[in-house]
Image (cartoon, rainbow, N blue to C red):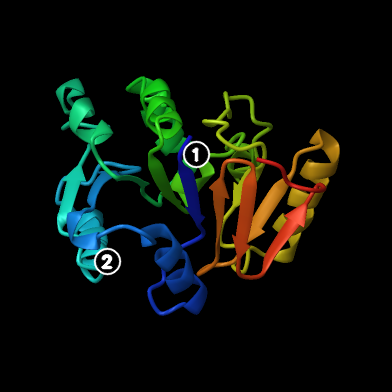
């Protein structure tokens, strides 16, 4: 089994973010790292991709593969993705991202990668994919989660990024949802994050846990 790095947001100026990055690259020669980048939405102009290229290049990482789930998708590139040292699930709308993963039948691919020792980085909506569901974001949209809201279930909690940005009304809805469903939720401020390594969970930054003790 590999490792999971769940970022609320990647803010290079944040000390906690820098700590997450340091732990992510620990023991690795950064100039030899290969990253597979999976966008949450169509990125025809590679605008968001270039932002992450710049981010990783700050650490000396230049081998970054763009693996599209949309118009440029081809299953022929799955083997190249599996060869990456890190798979990066980008930020973005977690509900639409989940639909794209299911549409391209990528669940098993990501599971196989993770259980073969691969490292997965999820940022914001990408980190949500690693948890139990995307239900919190259906809740935010005012729906009753009629649509299938299951996620990859690599951990047994739900991940709520940008906790510092949500208003108090939504935070109360999140608390009520947790009580109603018995769901554990990790509420993470921007710049902070969570590392899952087997049964060990390391919280980096000021993270609020709703719904009891978290287990991987």
Q: Does residue 169 lie above or below 127 as drawn?
A: below
Q: Quadrant of the C terminus?
A: top right
In-front residue for pair 171/28: 28
Report crowding for label 2: few under 14, some 14 to 19, many 20 or more residues within 10 A (C-alpha).
Answer: some
Residue found 60% across the figure and 48% down from its top: 159
- The numbered mark, 1 or 2, whose residue comes first in the sequence reads 2
The picture quadrant where one finds residue 168 is: bottom right
In-front residue for pair 158/193: 193
Q: Does residue 72 lie above or below 176 as drawn?
A: above
Residue found 52% across the figure and 30% down from its top: 152
The picture quadrant where one finds residue 165 is: bottom right
Q: Residue furthest right?
A: 179
Residue 207 pos. (x, y %): 67, 64
Residue that carries the numbered disc 2 in the rendered image: 55
Residue that carries the numbered disc 1 in the rendered image: 129
Residue 198 pos. (x, y %): 58, 41
Report crowding for label 1: few under 14, some 14 to 19, many 20 or more residues within 10 A (C-alpha).
Answer: many
Name the element at disc 2. Answer: helix
Residues at marks 1 and 2, CA–CA distance in whole angstroms: 21 Å
In-front residue for pair 28/88: 28
Label drawn at residue 97: none
In-front residue for pair 120/163: 120
How many dots with numbers?
Answer: 2
């Amino acid at each position: 089994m590999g490792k999971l790095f769940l970022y609320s947001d990647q803010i290079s100026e944040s000390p906690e973010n820098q700590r997450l990055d340091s732990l992510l690259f620990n023991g690795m020669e950064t100039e030899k790292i290969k990253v597979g980048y999976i966008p949450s939405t169509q990125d025809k102009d590679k605008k968001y991709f270039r932002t992450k290229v710049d981010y990783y290049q700050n650490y000396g990482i230049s081998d970054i593969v763009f693996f599209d789930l949309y118009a440029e998708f081809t299953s022929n590139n799955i083997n190249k993705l599996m060869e990456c040292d890190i798979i990066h699930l980008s930020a973005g709308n977690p509900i639409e991202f989940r639909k794209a993963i299911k549409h391209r039948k990528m669940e098993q691919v990501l599971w196989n990668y993770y259980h073969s020792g691969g490292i997965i980085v999820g940022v914001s909506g990408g980190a949500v994919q690693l948890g139990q569901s995307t239900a919190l974001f259906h809740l935010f949209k005012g729906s009753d989660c009629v649509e299938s809201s299951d996620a990859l279930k690599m951990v047994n909690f739900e991940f709520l990024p940008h906790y510092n940005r949500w208003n108090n009304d939504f935070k109360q809805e999140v608390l009520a949802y947790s009580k109603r469903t018995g769901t554990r939720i990790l509420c993470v401020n921007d710049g902070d994050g969570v590392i899952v390594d087997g049964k060990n969970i390391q919280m980096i930054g000021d993270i609020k846990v709703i719904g009891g003790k978290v287990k991987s």
